[in-house]
Amino acid sequence: MKKNNIGLNTVCTHIGEVKDEQFKGAVSPLYMSSSYAFDDVEVKRYPRYFNTPNQEALSKKVAALEHTEAAIIFGSGMAAVSTSLLAFLHKGDHIVLQNALYGGTMNLVLEEFHKYGIEYTFTKSLDVKDFKKAIKKNTKVIYIETPSNPLLKITDIRKVAKLAKKNNIVTMIDNTFASPVNQLPGTMGIDIMIHSATKYFGGHSDILAGAVAASAEHINQIFQLGKNLGGSLSDFTVWMLERSMKTLGIRVKEQNKNALKLANYLEKHESVAKVYYPGLKSHADYELAKSQMSGFGGMLSFELKPEYNVSKFFKSLKMIKPSMSLAGVESTMLSPTKTSHALLTPEEREKQGIADGLIRFSVGIEDKKDIISDINQAIKKSKKK
Ligand SMILES: *Cc1c(COP(=O)(O)O)cnc(C)c1O
């Protein structure tokens, strides 16, 4: 754990920046070289070694945000997830994974792990008791993701971390949904924080990237595999990401505010059956969320009542974009039934609590009244005749 006493927005704006000694420009210069001197230098630099000036600058910012010693930047969230997992799992090892995970992470485990002889167990629920039950003698990693997608369920970070420590198991969290603005798992005992930087870090729906923050030792272990797998990020995109992250704090805080207001509004709405948002007192895990999050995030889900046609609703939206992905400054919505959970049978979806009318809502920074008026005009048009 590395304590940092610098304020969040100052970290976002300044930490890591490369000083422009030559021209005294205000921002980090962009170094696009893929070739650096090998002789008479301290560090042999090469983009695939994650050590160009811009890559190092951004790593420092991510580490400071997550209060860790070190960080490493990847070409995508999945490169960050896969490299981290495989760096700590070898043939014959076992991993315990939370049962509600990002679809890409599920696919990685289900489609690839058997090829490497890695055993896995998905927990029955998010309750720490089920994590305990799933641990075996050869368990090397516990992997969680909270709040979960798409129902925003909460896993008890402190309890899982404690359980893992007792059993000498490395813990990883996908901290994408909360972002370090709202949740600092490293301060609650989690070892490795993973991000799809495509989401809140980027924040403008125009960057594909990933990041991992942890102790220097853990990051080095991930780096050793990372340089062989080759999932680093090009410097231009690294530089774009550094720029985007300067506003991470103010963007996410605005999204927290909007999402909380909208969750409250939708919960009282006559056309809405249910709202899932950890910041609502009606949320099953509200108290737990409050104990481990400083803000509740920009993601919420809601269910339209059966008398509304969801496809018609999406087609009727004017400002809010029906689209995959999330966390941009613009509001977007998607139907889990038609996207992330399309391959499940209706019965399997029902078992997971994913109704046909469920809408996942990535709340942007637009003015609340404009978001509400768009939702309401679309609801009006989608009433079944
Ligand atoms: C998008 C996402 C990922 C994967 O990230 P990519 O940048 O698309 O590779 C992983 N975890 C979560 C929670 C995500 O939302």
Image: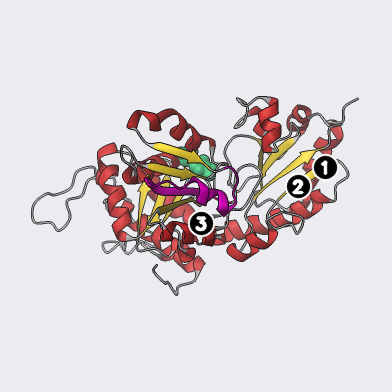
Magenta segment includes 130: yes
* Position of residue 25 measured from the top left corner of the image (x, y, whole percent): 35, 61
Query: Pointer 1: what residue?
Result: 272
Magenta segment includes 244: no
The residue closer to the viewer here, 277 or 27, is 277
- Residue shown at 50% from the left, 62% from the top: 184
Label 1 to label 2: alpha-carbon separation: 8 Å
Q: Amino acid at mark 1?
A: Val
Q: Amino acid at mark 3?
A: Val
Say whether marks 1 and 3 touch (CB < 8 Å): no
Give the mark nearest the N terminus, 1 or 3. 3
Res. 86 visible in picture = yes
Label 3 to label 2: alpha-carbon separation: 27 Å
- Residue shown at 11% from the left, 49% from the top: 38
* Position of residue 284 measured from the top left corner of the image (x, y, whole percent): 71, 54
Query: Pointer 2: what residue?
Result: 275
Q: Is mark 3 within 8 Å of ligand 1?
A: no
Q: Which mark is residue 160?
A: 3
Numbered disc 1: secondary structure: strand
Q: Residues within 10 Å of mark 3 (few under 14, many from 20)?
A: many
Res. 47 visible in picture = no
- Say which of marks 3 and 2 sits in front: 3
Q: Amino acid at mark 2?
A: Val
- Say which of marks 1 and 3 sits in front: 3
Say whether marks 3 and 2 touch (CB < 8 Å): no
Q: Which residues are magenta?
A: 124-146
Quadrant of the rendered image containing residue 293 = bottom right
Q: Is mark 2 within 8 Å of ligand 1?
A: no
- Residue shown at 47% from the left, 68% from the top: 10
